[in-house]
Image: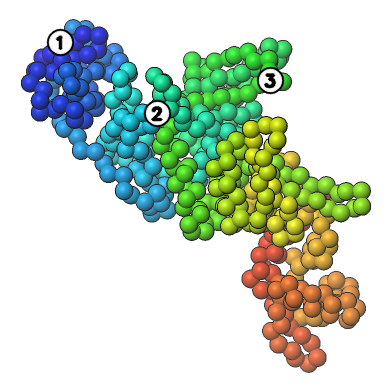
Amino acid sequence: MKVEVKRGRVWLPNNKEWLNKFIEFNISNNKKKESFVTCINKDGRFYIPKQIRSKLNINKEININNIKILNNIKRNEKLIKKNKLNLIAAIPEKTLSNYNIIVVDKKDKYLCWYSAKGRPNEIILNKHLPIEFIKLLGYFQAEGGKPKLQKRRGREFNFTNSDFNLIKEFFELSNYLFDKDLWKFIISHNKNLNKSELDILINKLRSLEIKKSNIKLREDNNLKTYGIRLYVSNSILAETINNMNKLIKELMSKSKNNLFFKYYFRSYIAGDGNFFSNRDKFGSLHSRMRVYEEKEEYINMHKRLFDKYIINGKIRKDPKKNLYYYTITANWFTLLKFLEYNLFINNNHYKKLIWAISNHKKYKAVKHIVRLKNNFSSYDINKLFNKNYSGGSHWLRDREKEGLIFLKYKENNRSYWKLTKEGSKLKRLLKNINSSSYLK
């Protein structure tokens, strides 16, 4: 069936069968064929996407080869399936502006589309994502723009940071979900920033196989140096990421999963967190981890998760800024938890954590545990630590009270001991401390 095309729009005759339904059209022109999803509105028209008009070199008319009514995929799946993130669980059924979203199965991908008053907006997304994609959600929570309903404007999925390594990891993680060519980059910079420094930054972005045309420069004299913003203008993508972010936090709050917590919060802290450790004038050690949020609902959720996985902290509201912060005052066990979860991507934070642990009074008492075998005797303690009988006996008694070792048996006036599960874990963690380049 041949139909007339006017400014990309086609009026479909005898359209009652397809009215207000999601349709897949197969069209052709000059022996070239293309398919696309659309919706027939109440006046019987549909819109041919600009890129398809360009590919087929459409001028005044096209040939419709096939019209297929599509069934929308249900969204009642679980987020985690076969140790992967199952995307369909996070794709909304409607946009924030209340337009229905159609999801079409395309082998290992989903075609997602909705009909807006303006330009139709579709995107191809991968069905299943590796668990490490949770890292991107942590970055998004810290430095990403959350979807907002604004009149006559779609939503953006975006991320802003000045650390190229964080930009690189975020960008590479996003490749699990969608085509990297969709990203646009804006480098905002102080006008006095050296041109050679800008060129180096652009070359770094180009090394990620980003098109030069997708990189823009903008002066911003409020910045000391520069900031990088990457964004995709697509409401479905922005709202899907936001949904997935909420779902993964709900999942972590219902059932404890240390890997999910580690992936999510190490990225979150890298973007919106800090770690401090110092001695006061009396020689006492003070260590604190802090994260920041503008919205009270977010900081309350993060407090519940930190409380569940590490230790209780406190929320405070900044009296001068529209900002909440959550602070954990870290004791010995909390410092070890930070190390266990490997929460600090930032080198300065990690270096400070190693310093705090190695300078804690508890470290001096237990650091030699790394030199013990899982099974050992009281004689080994005296020999290893160069302690007399009394000193070795006190060390064993203290570690037993702490649940790090237990007495297996006694024989010929000698005690035989074994590391507990907690003792073995501490040994593994302290190996990281002893092997750290920051202590050398």
10 Å crowding of disc 1: few (<14), some (14-19), many (20+): some
Residue 115 vs 402, above or below: the answer is above
Identify the residue under disc 1.
4
Give the residue type that dot 2 points to. Answer: Ser
Query: Is 320 left, or right, of 251 in this rendering?
Result: right
- Which badge, 2 or 3, comes first in the chain's sequence? 3
For label 3, the SS is loop
**Residue at image location 41% in from the left, 51% down from the top:** 80
For label 1, the SS is strand
For label 2, the SS is helix
- Which badge, 3 or 1, comes first in the chain's sequence? 1
Query: Is 244 left, or right, of 266 in this rendering?
Result: left
Q: Which of the two residues, 345 or 143, is positioned nearer the viewer here?
A: 143
Identify the residue under disc 2.
235
Give the residue type that dot 1 points to. Answer: Glu
Q: Position of residue 171 (x, y in %)?
A: 52, 32
The quadrant in which the N terminus is found is top left
Point out the frontmost of discs 3 and 1: 3
Q: Which of the two residues, 263 or 283, is positioned nearer the viewer here?
A: 283
The colour scheme is rainbow
10 Å crowding of disc 3: few (<14), some (14-19), many (20+): few
For the residues bearing labels 2 and 3, Cβ distance under 8 angstroms: no
Point out the frontmost of discs 2 and 1: 2
For the residues bearing labels 3 and 1, Cβ distance under 8 angstroms: no
Spatial separation of the CA atoms under disc 3 and disc 1: 53 Å
Q: Position of residue 8 (x, y in %)?
A: 24, 12
Spatial separation of the CA atoms under disc 2 and disc 3: 29 Å
**Residue at image location 32% in from the left, 18% down from the top:** 119
Identify the residue under disc 3.
223
**Residue at image location 85% in from the left, 71% down from the top:** 385
